[in-house]
Image (tube, helix red, strand yellow):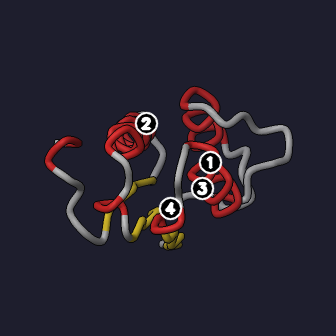
Amino acid sequence: MRVIRLDARGWHDRDDLWRDLLAGLGAPGWHGANLDALYDGLVAGENSVRPPLVVEIAGAARLPAALVAYLTRIRAVFDDAARDGGAVAVRFTAPLSAAAR
C-alpha cells in the first residue's frame, strides 16, 4: 500500500490543502480542486498514484477551525470512495481538534 504523507502545518487555507493533496495523488493538471473531483479521481483512477493508498496528514490539529472542518469532509470523500470499491483511506497523525469530531 502506498502512503502519501502531507504536512499540514504550513496550510493557511483550502488552496494550500488542495495544492499538496492533488500533487501527492499525482492528479492531472485539469483535475478540479473540489470534493466531487476528488471522489471521481479516487474511484476512476485518474491520478497517477493508484490505489491501494493512504493519505497521512500530519499537523492538522493546529489548523484554523474552518480548515479542520473541511478536512472532515475530505475524510468523508475518502470513506465514500472506499465503500465504492477504492482501496483508499485518509488518516491523521495527531487527533483533530474537538471542532472536527
Tell me what residue is drawn at x 43 percent, y 41 percent.
74
Tell me what residue is drawn at x 50 percent, y 61 percent.
52
Dot 1: within a 10 Å radius of its alpha carbon, few (fewer than 14), some, or many (20 or more) residues? some
Lower sequence index among marks 3 and 4 = 3
Q: Amino acid at mark 2?
A: Val
- Residue hosting label 3: 21
**Secondary structure beneath label 2:** helix
Lower sequence index among marks 2 and 4 = 4
Mark identifier at residue 77: 2
User: Is residue 43 depicted above or below 54 in this figure?
Assistant: above
Q: Of tags 3 and 4, which is closer to the observer?
A: 3
CA distance for labels 3 and 1: 5 Å
CA distance for labels 2 and 1: 14 Å
Q: Of tags 2 and 1, which is closer to the observer?
A: 1
- Residue hosting label 1: 18
CA distance for labels 1 and 4: 20 Å
CA distance for labels 2 and 3: 13 Å
Q: Amino acid at mark 3?
A: Leu
In x, y percent, where is residue 62? Answer: 32, 62
Mark identifier at residue 52: 4
